[in-house]
Image (cartoon, rainbow, N blue to C red):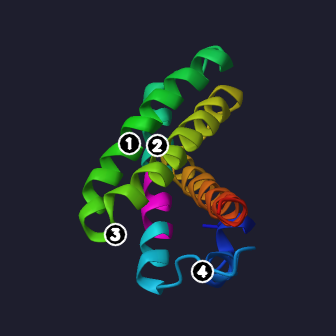
Amino acid sequence: MQFPSFLTLNVSFVYHFAVMDDRAGRAMEHRIYFIIGDVLACVLAGALGGWLAHSAVAGDLSMLFAMFIGMFLGMVGGMLVGFIMGPFFGAMEIMLPTGFAGMGAGMVVGMQHTMGVIDPTQAAINGAGVGFACLVIIYLLQAHLHGEVQ
């Protein structure tokens, strides 16, 4: 099985953005345990959201309705992963990224399923990639916003 190129990124890419100093001179989270936990939680939330969206969306459904159904089911999947992984990595730090990752993955995979036939394994892989991309976006926004707030 060939994995998409965006899944071959390693943890050091996220780690680079996690430890870069912000404008106020303070460092963001740099403990590797929590960074790996964030990556694992978002990838799992994305995979679950993508798989749920694939299982619920019919292939002949309108793309707009598929996006809304995928968004709802992805949020549910992201919340489930957040509740399970929250005690290990911190509920406040895990819930926003997993909810966002599940929602984004559900929307993307739901729309992909209406455009063409994809199998459940490919839906989970695509969802995991979207979940990782959502985590990178959240880390970049956190680094940017943390530097502006005094």
- Which residue type carries mark 1? Gly
Kind of residue at disc 3: Phe
Q: Are marks 1 and 2 in contact (CB under 8 Å)?
A: yes
Examine the rendering and report whether any part of residue 47 can be seen.
Answer: no
Nearest the eye: 46 or 37? 37
Q: In the image, residue 97 lies at what x, y percent?
A: 50, 53
Is residue 56 shown above or below 51?
A: above
Disc 4: which residue: 11
Q: Quadrant of residue 65?
A: top right
**Residue under circle 1?**
77
Give the mark, 3 or 1, whose residue is nearer the N terminus: 1
Answer whether labels 4 and 1 touch (C-beta < 8 Å): no
* Nearest to N terminus: mark 2 or mark 4: 4
User: Judging from the image, what secondary structure is the residue with disc 2 in?
Assistant: helix
Instruction: Residue under label 3, please give it.
Output: 89
Give how far across and how far down residue 115 sits, in percent.
Answer: 71, 29
Binning the other alpha carbons within 10 Å of mark 4 as few (below 14), some (14 to 19) or many (20 upward) gives: few
